Image: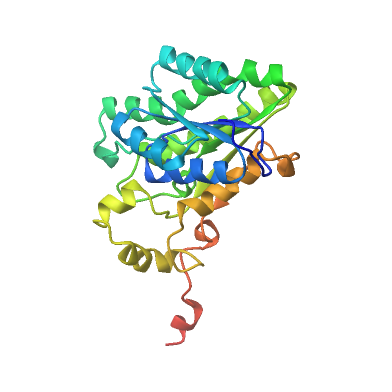
């Protein structure tokens, strides 16, 4: 990794969990574009190989189950050993194991383990290294689902709501180590789940998303990646403990959506 690096994240090292996904790769690529070196972490070894090849010389990968604390420790140790330090953690890995009101106890426990507990454990693992280096930035990927009710979805939105609160708690307790902690809540964003549900039809995804977003479409993961990159940069030095909506206006739109409701009373 001897090539010349420039950008607002130049010299910084980032760990991105869930890095083998469409979303994770886009975020890693965005961080690299801004100068960071990146370790992408995922349980999907074949996906990681593909992503690492795509990302180029500024990325390394680590196959790991983030529900295993030993695996987390190994990721952190390798990052320190090969990249020298850790400045950024993006907790992006996520479980969608959700059956709504019919979710089993195992589904609840596995979802909370991946989406909440593992983010906390990864944060705890990088904290001493960030503190030793004089500070750092952690970004937790949350969701618009954290703040609204959605039919047939329980474990996922509850876990994301918990992650928003975890972000506040981490920000408070890590502040003394000069570690800023924020979360980003995307709206509908092109990702593995959108790709799967639409059978790869991005145009259809945008059409379905349009009524729920001021922007009239689903977001690109790279757009969310830019928000994450900003929060990890020195330009966001005053920002911590905050949940950022990167949702095309979804969370600002009320139940009337873009349709004038009052005139219906006169019809």
Q: Position of residue 218 (x, y in %)?
A: 43, 60
Point out the image quarter for the C terminus.
bottom left
Q: Position of residue 143 (x, y in %)?
A: 47, 45
Which of 177/148 is in front?
A: 177
Q: Give the color scheme: rainbow, by chain, secondary structure or one colour.
A: rainbow
Residue closest to the far top: 70
Which of 192/57 is in front?
A: 57
Q: Is residue 95 visible?
A: no
Q: Is residue 41 above or below residue 245?
A: above
Image quadrant in which you'd find residue 1: top right
Q: Is residue 147 above or below residue 163?
A: below
Q: Position of residue 69 (x, y in %)?
A: 43, 14
Which of 31/151 is in front?
A: 31
Q: Position of residue 6 (x, y in %)?
A: 66, 42
Which of 166/123 is in front?
A: 123
Q: Is residue 181 visible?
A: yes
Horizontal side of residue 101 vs 93, given as left or right: left
Q: Residue at x 55, y 60 (%)?
A: 252
Q: Residue at x 66, y 33 (%)?
A: 11
Q: Count the marks: how many?
A: 0
Horizontal side of residue 2 vs 49, given as left or right: right
Image quadrant in which you'd find residue 95: top left
Q: Is residue 143 above or below residue 216?
A: above
Image quadrant in which you'd find residue 19: top left
Horizontal side of residue 209 vs 200, given as left or right: right
Residue closest to the far bottom: 267
Q: Is residue 50 above or below residue 71?
A: below
């Amino acid at each position: 990794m001897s090539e010349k690096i420039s950008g607002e994240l130049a010299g910084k090292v980032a760990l991105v969990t869930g890095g083998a996904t469409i979303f994770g790769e886009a975020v890693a690529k965005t961080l690299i574009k801004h100068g960071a070196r990146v370790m992408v972490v995922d349980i999907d070894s074949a996906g990681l190989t593909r992503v690492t090849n795509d990302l180029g010389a500024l990325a390394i990968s680590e196959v790991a189950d983030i529900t295993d604390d030993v695996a987390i420790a190994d990721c952190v140790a390798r990052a320190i050993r090969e990249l020298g330090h850790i400045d950024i953690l993006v907790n992006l890995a996520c479980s969608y194991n959700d059956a709504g009101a019919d979710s089993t106890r195992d589904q609840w426990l596995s979802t909370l383990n991946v989406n909440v507990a593992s983010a906390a454990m990864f944060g705890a693992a990088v904290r001493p290294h960030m503190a030793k280096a004089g500070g750092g930035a952690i970004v937790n990927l949350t969701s618009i689902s954290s703040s609204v009710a959605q039919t047939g979805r329980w474990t996922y939105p509850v876990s994301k709501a918990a992650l928003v609160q975890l972000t506040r708690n981490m920000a408070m307790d890590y502040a003394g180590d000069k570690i800023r902690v924020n979360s980003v809540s995307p709206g509908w964003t092109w990702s593995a789940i959108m790709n799967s549900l639409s059978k790869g039809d991005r145009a259809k995804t945008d059409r379905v998303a349009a009524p729920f977003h001021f922007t009239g479409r689903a977001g690109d993961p790279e757009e969310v990646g830019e928000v994450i990159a900003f929060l990890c940069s020195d330009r966001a030095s005053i920002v911590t403990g905050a949940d950022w909506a990167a949702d095309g206006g979804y969370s600002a739109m009320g139940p009337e959506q873009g349709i004038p409701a009052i005139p219906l009373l006169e019809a």
